Image: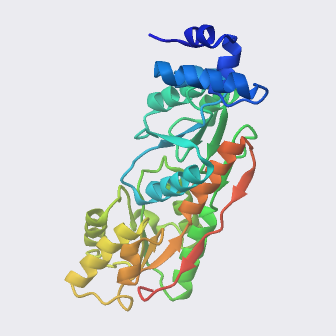
Amino acid sequence: MTNIHDIAKLAGVSVSTVSRVLNNYKYVSEEKRLKVKQIIKELNYTPNNNAIDLIRGETKRIGVIIPYNNNQAFDQMLHGILNKSSELDFSVTVLPSKYNKKRELEYLAMLKSKQLDALIITSKANHWDKIIPFTQYGTIISCEYTEREEIGCAYVDRFASYLEVFQMLKQKGHQRIAFTTARGNESISTKQTINAYQNVIGEMYQKFHIGNCFCLEDGYKAAEILLNQKNRPTAIYANGDEVAGGIFQYCQYNKLQIPEEVAIVGQENQPIGEVLGITTVNHRLSALGAQAFELAVNRTLDKIEIPYEIIQRSST
């Protein structure tokens, strides 16, 4: 099998000169560059990209730890990341974790083995103390806010958005407000939603909180539980527009008037929410993903906030 030494011998140049040609480095005479390229073509030589990466000191590859690939929020972040990667001519390695701590650490070790230039964490299972040691091998960017100075982040102030939604619903006259979440109470977003609820509404959240909601069917089931209570809620804040769509579907099937009997708010400005006229909190996650990718490529540890917006529609 042809190797870089064979090419150097046939071209009458040093191995380092062949390496410079393969890596498109300057400071190689045009005569030598053409000679090396001619030999490469004649021998039908394909360079070892891993070896080239090691010589160059970078892979032009960014890893993205993502818990699920069928979740509208993470899909939007990934969409922004992939768009920006194409624009900046970098490749992306998607690393599904399912919130498995051991798997996350294995992905982080890819920085140490120089398989990745940087790593974006959309959401994590491990504590930062487990993650920080890997920053010595490459840049790590979070899609959630962190005060840790070793980690850069692009983030949305979700707590502020949750507060604003509950305040908006309360100002519209709602006292019994329910909400849904995805993960359990170990999730940062779930903790922030509960905290915001307590700040605005009070302590009745345990009665009006349904977890493990990810899709249309989950929303339907959540509505079935919430809206069959004796003192049922008059408003429901769903953790996604698909979940909100399931709640909407249940209300229509059971002839509950929206928003007169039940107001509905979703999240992430999905097409289903726009079609059904569901008020939504747009956390602009595609823009967040794009910003996180720029931080990773530039290897900067800035903390950049992406502003959210509440889009009012007929469901409230």
Q: Is residue 228 above or below residue 82?
A: below
Total numbered labels placed on residues in the image: 0
Instruction: Please tell me which residue is depicted at 62% across the width and 26% down the height of the picture.
Output: 22
Instruction: Please tell me which residue is depicted at 46% across the width and 66% down the height of the picture.
Output: 205
* Residue 148 in the image, given as x and y percentages of width and height: 72, 41
Extreme residue toward the left, this view: 253
Please state which of residues 93 and 145 is positioned toward the viewer in this rendering. Answer: 93
Horizontal relation, residue 16 to residue 101: left or right: right
State which quadrant residue 34 falls in: top right
Q: Is residue 295 above or below residue 114?
A: below
Quadrant of the snapshot with the N terminus? top left
Instruction: Please tell me which residue is depicted at 43% across the width and 89% down the height of the picture.
Output: 314
* Residue 113 in the image, given as x and y percentages of width and height: 57, 21
Q: Is residue 45 visible?
A: no
Please state which of residues 92 and 45 is positioned toward the viewer in this rendering. Answer: 45
Please state which of residues 256 and 141 is positioned toward the viewer in this rendering. Answer: 141
Q: Is residue 80 above or below residue 100?
A: below
Please state which of residues 288 and 311 is positioned toward the viewer in this rendering. Answer: 288
* Residue 239 in the image, given as x and y percentages of width and height: 44, 65
Instruction: Report the coloring of the rendering.
Output: rainbow
Q: Is residue 23 visible?
A: yes
State which quadrant residue 109 falls in: top right
Extreme residue toward the right, this view: 27
* Residue 275 in the image, given as x and y percentages of width and height: 36, 81
Instruction: Please tell me which residue is depicted at 46% across the width and 86% down the height of the picture.
Output: 313
Quadrant of the snapshot with the C terminus? bottom left
